[in-house]
Image (cartoon, coloured by chain):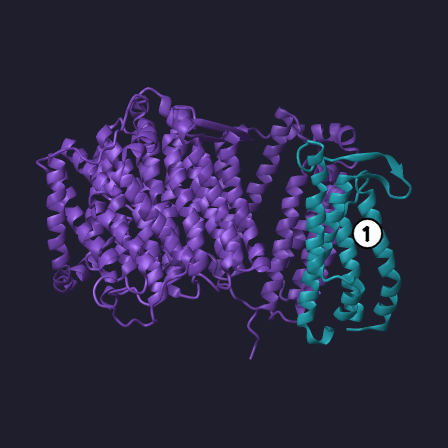
Amino acid sequence: MKTLILQTTNRVIMGILLVFSVFLLLRGHNLPGGGFSGGLVAASAFALHALACGVPSARTMLVFDPRTLIGLGLAIALLSGAPALAEHLPYLTGLWDKTPLPVIGKIGTPLVFDVGVYFVVLGVVLLLVFSLADEEGSWS
Amino acid sequence: MGNGIILSIAAVFLAGFVSPAAFRLLGGRFGKLLALVPLAAFVFYASLVPSVGGGRAVHAAIPWADSLGIPLTFHVDGLSLLFLLIISLVGTFVVLYATGYLHGSKSLGKFFLYLMSFMGAMLGIVSSDNLILLFIFWELTSITSFLLIGYYHEDAASRRSALQALLVTGAGGLAMLAGFILLGVTAGTSEISELNALPAGTLAAAPAFSWILGLILLGAFTKSAQFPFHFWLPNAMAAPAPVSSFLHSATMVKAGVFLLARLHPCLSAHELWVGIVAPVGAATLITGVFLGLRQTDLKKILAYTTLAVLGTLTMLLGIGTELAIKACLVYLLAHALYKAALFMSAGSVDHETGTREIAELSGLRRTMPFTAAGAIVGALSMAGIPLLLGFVSKEYFYKALLDADGPLFLWEAIGVGTSMLLFALAVIAGVRPFLGQLKATPKHAHEAPWTMWIGPLVLGVLAIKFGAFPGWVGEHLITPASQAVVADASFHAHLKLWHGWNTALVLSIITVVGGVLAYAAAPVWRRMSAGLYRVLSAIGPETAYDRLLDGVLGFAKWQTRTLQNGKLRNYILTVGGFATVLLIFQIVRVPFEIDLARMSPPSLLGTTVCGLIMAAGIFACFAKSRFTAILTLGVVGLGVAILFFLFSAPDLAMTQILVETLTVILFVLAFYKLPLLREFSSSAIKARDAIFAAVFGIVMAALVMIAFHFEQTAGPISDYMSANSLPLANGRNVVNVILVDFRALDTLGEITVLAVAALGVFAMLRLRTPKP
């Protein structure tokens, strides 16, 4: 299944998809997008890479094991609710820094929460894709 | 002082939590240090004796789940204090004892974590003022007891006993929780001190009272191993000796008795109380001595005598006269002192000689003088010999029985008869192994380390001191405790050693004579009665327990085979079928009208897309290859995405397209492994599936139209979200704001489910049995 066309295209597309996924994640609070769709796009990027260049290569690119990403994402989402407790507000109440940063925009705990969602979705999809692909001897 | 109570409980828990780390760092030495914690608690509780004894109960409260009406309230009166003193004193010696008994054990830190957690929970039970708080501590003792009984977890019998104790006491605990909630709702308060202050008979008149009483009694009876739930206690002797002497004689099994005493003022004013509690206690008492007689294992003998005593205490509470309450509390104190001593001594004997069989043990006083002294004093107290607290308690026990209403000397006969047998068992278990000629044992016996005999010895000294001079105990411990149980602050329980020549004393003398005879006859009885016991055990409650457990497991297997048979098609049918039935039920129940005129007219584009989706769906059903089926389903998915766009929901549309894309990738990956499509279904099954699919579709469509109706009448919920998304949550994308802010907790739950599902798939793919 390793074809030259797919491998060459992938080299270009992968970067664009990953940047696009972060773009979706960051704009999500005001415009269509968010952690869920961002995570799905990022997952498609790595899945495409796995199709083109094999699972081991995709795993190397990802650096972290998908299971680590799931745990990391859950931990981020879980902790993003904690600052509200310090302010004596209910858990997961959104707190915002009102001055927007360049490029990223306004920073707040819901954004951190969304980053957690992003990583969980990325990890979950890739865990499925890699596990299924590893089964196929010819892919790895 | 109120904070002191909370602090002392917290300190015990904390000491448990640091134990695993501390034992790794400091080794076995930490055990002796650890004993200082319960000792400090004991000293503190002892310092409360004058004020609590003077009628000033200690009260403390921390706000907690106030919206549910569950504050952390603690209330220490005479009854609580008596228990606090027993638990912390016996606890101190048990911790010391365990450092010797389990010396060199690998998981000593874990053991003390469980033991101290248990102790903290037990202290919590007896000082809680809130029913729910009491329940939490109660369950904690069940769980720690489970862990402690199963301490030797490599042993299958240990695991079985641990599970049995957990299931029996846990089931009772759940019944008790139901009873507590009913009680709280009926009375309008869950504070025990307020419940007990209600005028007598208020609760007994409530219609739910028999349920309240029955459920709470179930909890108390299972915990205190009352007939017919008694079987778990002797089996719990699989635990190490320190656990047996602490949990299964002196403290945990008394929790049930404590609860009966605690709630005596508000629950006893009903004929059911006397009608149930006293007979159950009597039955336990008789069962205990009767089954105890056949035993030849030191710990088992002691376990059955513990059953007998628990029965006695319950019976006395059931009789419920002031004299009976006083007798119950004296008996309880005496038993805690002598039984803890006897269990520790039995453990030492086992530890040093390698056997607990009474036939193999003899003359140990020569090699184990201190252990022998503690055990013999304990046994004599249990037998009811004068100058020991056991004698005093037995005198009051007889007095209470003589005083009680009952048919024709029934109580007296039960009391004297069982006391004779208890006398015999005390001599068999506590005196006989130490007298006579020294016998060869599996291990060469020598005296145990001081940590193991100091407890029995001190407890023995206390039994002598309290027995010879019972005045102080009566004045400062028993009187305040009795006042709490009978809810009468003017009640006074004077204890005296010598009452002159009266009926109780005559009964005591008869008991000793009868006990000696019973001791002599015990070996003969054991030989003759083996067949009888076999028949009894075949029809006993433990057999019923086993049957019930087998039944539950059998049912679980059956329903797993039936519902989770591995055919995805059936799963969809089950889940969808139930959903359809419930939805139809709800649609029929709630009146509504569908007003087509108020809906917007169908657009050409929308209608075309819908037609495309339907056509693709139907086509997929008749597809001959999997590839076609997947492609046509993709058309359905993309069509839905277009609909989302048409109704200006770009977020949903985008996500839908992404999910469709990934589905294709996953399908490609799994494609080669799947078998070819074949005809699996008969026409009948196909027809069934078609009908099911049609009904499900129609119901969902109806649901959407009904939702439209309610949106028209009640206003759409989206208004609030749209109006507040920017001002409250700083976001213009309402969908995202709902996901990460308004309903963030739901999202957190969803991503957790997602993660668990992915791990499940991963495990299934990885752990599959490899093909040959």
Give whichever of B540, B562 is nearer the camera. Answer: B540
Give the quadrant of the C terminus of chain B.
Answer: bottom right
The chain that appears cyan in the image is: A
Mark 1 residue type: Ser
Q: Residue at x 68, y 31 (%)?
A: A88
Residue B280's spot in the image, x, y percent? 23, 41
Rendered colour, chain B: purple
Left or right: where B600 falls relative to B366 = right
Left or right: where B659 falls relative to B325 = right
Left or right: where A18 falls relative to B277 = right
Mark 1 packing: few (<14 Cα in 10 Å), some, or many (20+)?
Answer: many
Q: Residue furthest bottom?
A: B772
Tell me: residue B713, above or below residue B86: above
Tell me: residue B324, above or below residue B304: above
Q: Which residue is mark 1?
A: A21
Q: Residue at x 37, y 22 (%)?
A: B197
Element on which disc 1 rests: helix
Residue B766's spot in the image, x, y percent? 61, 68
* Residue B372 in sight from this viewpoint: yes
* Residue B548 in sight from this viewpoint: no
Residue A120's spot in the image, x, y percent? 70, 52
